[in-house]
Amino acid sequence: MKYIDKLRNSGLRPTKQRLQICEVLFNTERTFHFTINELEQKIKDRIDNKISLATIYNTVHAFEKKGYLKQIPVNSNQTYFDTNITDHHHFYNLKDGKLIDLENSDVGPINIKRKIDGKKIKSIEVLVKLED
Amino acid sequence: MKYIDKLRNSGLRPTKQRLQICEVLFNTERTFHFTINELEQKIKDRIDNKISLATIYNTVHAFEKKGYLKQIPVNSNQTYFDTNITDHHHFYNLKDGKLIDLENSDVGPINIKRKIDGKKIKSIEVLVKLED
DNA sequence: CAGCTATTTAGAACCATTATAAACTATATA
DNA sequence: TATATAGTTTATAATGGTTCTAAATAGCTG
Ligand SMILES: [Mn+2]
Ligand SMILES: [Mn+2]
Ligand SMILES: [Zn+2]
Ligand SMILES: [Zn+2]
């Protein structure tokens, strides 16, 4: 029930697969970061039926387009997503490839003074790489 | 002659290929951003002999390890490199995938207040995504 | 239910990147 | 200068994340 309206209101049919992916992504105490492979594993662990990898990709991209997920820019061969869609910044642990949310109070407001003609700022993202 | 010492001092043999890649990367008025494919094209345009793609990858990674190049984190299927190895930030034009350097004065100093036990900050990078 | 469109799926294709291993080259040493 | 050795280049294959395809299935509207 919980996610049916969310999906319908977005013009997405509330299929069994999408509802199950919603459970995994959004029915959590905390937000989290994931790659597609990590999400695939999480889904396998939590549900009995199988969801094809293609559907996982399709759904993640659909949710991203609707603004329910964000992509986080990092140097990796895999794409990183975030269920925390608020404006926030990240630590990136180079050792294990894990992201950690930074509170805005940990970074402070960032004011970009330069403008590019005809362009709007869509997002401002700080990535703090961590090493040992 | 110009890059022979640079390479030798880094423990890299100054091969014909590496010297030619140095010319393309570093013998320029301005620093620039590139993907491997763009670099491959630049090399083709500037030199007569052929340098294999494998050598271009090898050399770029060798130079990155030595600190002569930096990788810039963006959401793209291709890896972006920068010949500007100073600490600086970027505009990322989503329309054409081009990076633009931001001066530090355009962003202001960023002071990360949070610490992670046993970890050091390696870099702080701001990515400002631009849309129309 | 009927009809229509959206969605799911297995598998193929794509493509940036990395691995392989044989040929070649820079360099140190005799 | 010749030789030995480790480093480098290269064509090519392999890898692996992501996207595409097209047929089967499922949601939705009348
Ligand atoms: Mn993607
Ligand atoms: Mn790389
Ligand atoms: Zn986050
Ligand atoms: Zn730059």
Image: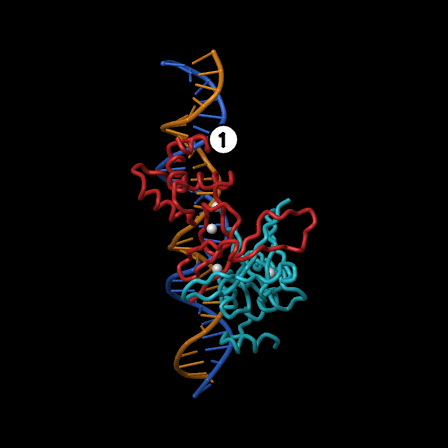
Chain colours: A cyan, B red, C orange, D blue
The residue lying toward the viewer, choosing from B79 and A40, is: B79
The residue lying toward the viewer, choosing from D18 and A74, is: A74
Instruction: Mark yes or no: residue A51 visible.
Output: yes
Q: Is residue B53 left or right of residue A28?
A: left
Total marks shown come to 1
Residue farthest toward the front in the current orientation of the protein:
B105
Which quadrant holds residue A119? bottom left
> As shown in the figure, which amino acid type bears the numbered disc 1?
Asn
Chain to which the residue tagged by mark 1 belongs: B
Crowd around label 1: few <14 · some 14–19 · many ≥20 (10 Å): few
Task: Write down the residue under mark 1.
Answer: B9
Screen quadrant of the N terminus of chain B: top left
Which quadrant holds residue B56? top left
Secondary structure beneath dot 1 equals helix
Q: Is residue C6 left or right of residue A3?
A: left
Horizontal and vertical percent for residue A66?
51, 70
- Looking at the image, is C2 positioned above or below residue A48? below
Residue farthest toward the left in the current orientation of the protein:
B48
The residue lying toward the viewer, choosing from B86 and B121, is: B86
Instruction: Mark yes or no: residue A36 visible.
Output: no
Horizontal and vertical percent for residue A58?
48, 65
Residue farthest toward the right in the current orientation of the protein:
B117
- Looking at the image, is D9 positioned above or below residue B37? above
